[in-house]
Image: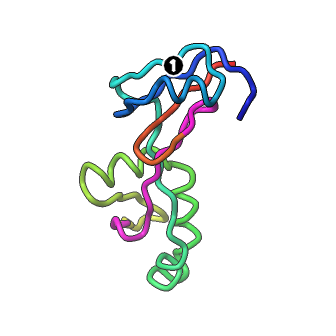
Amino acid sequence: LNMPLKKAIIYGDVSCTDTIESTLNIEEVVISHEPREVTKIAVPVYRKIGPHFKEKGKTIIDEIKRNREKVAEEMEERGYYEFSHGGDAIRIDREFVEIKEEARENLLKAGDVFVVVEK
């Protein structure tokens, strides 16, 4: 908390930069309304996949993990993700994944506010 930081870029609606600078020992605080630097990923909901898909559950979980960004994108666009395995078309609906925002290494998330920290 008291480690001196060169700069923090905050993505979101924040109005108390003076307090942030003095409290956190940051030389420069920048507020930005540009798009934040995160990636949306899909995470399997195990408790629903297993009982519903039974023996295909492992295949579905592996597919979600292998293509987590693509699955998240298609879920948001179409509400489902479809792939082929062993000649079968498998459709995964929205209830079987959780969409999360994954921050890059030096990006912190607090609610709807994102902070880029430079040491």
Q: Is residue 29 above or below residue 11?
A: above
* Residue 48, percent from left and from top: 47, 78
User: Which residue appears at 49% of the width and 85% of the height?
Assistant: 51
Q: Quadrant of residue 46?
A: bottom right
Q: Is residue 24 magenta?
A: no
Q: Amino acid at mark 1?
A: Val
Give the camera-side residue of 14 and 98: 14
Q: Is residue 106 magenta?
A: yes
Q: Is residue 33 above or below residue 40?
A: above
* Residue 73, percent from left and from top: 35, 46
* Residue 72, percent from left and from top: 40, 50
Give the camera-side residue of 93 and 106: 106
Q: Residues within 10 Å of mark 1 (few under 14, many from 20)?
A: some
Q: Is residue 30 left or right of residue 35?
A: right
Q: Magenta segment, which residues?
A: 92-108
Figure colour scheme? rainbow
Please identify the residue farthest to the right as the structure is shown: 3
Q: Quadrant of residue 14?
A: top left
Indicate the secondary structure of the residue bearing disc 1. Answer: strand
Figure quadrant of the N terminus: top right
* Residue 66, percent from left and from top: 56, 50
Residue beneath label 1, please? 29
Figure quadrant of the C terminus: top right
Q: Quadrant of residue 36?
A: top left
Please identify the residue farthest to the left as the structure is shown: 78
Q: Is residue 4 above or below residue 57?
A: above
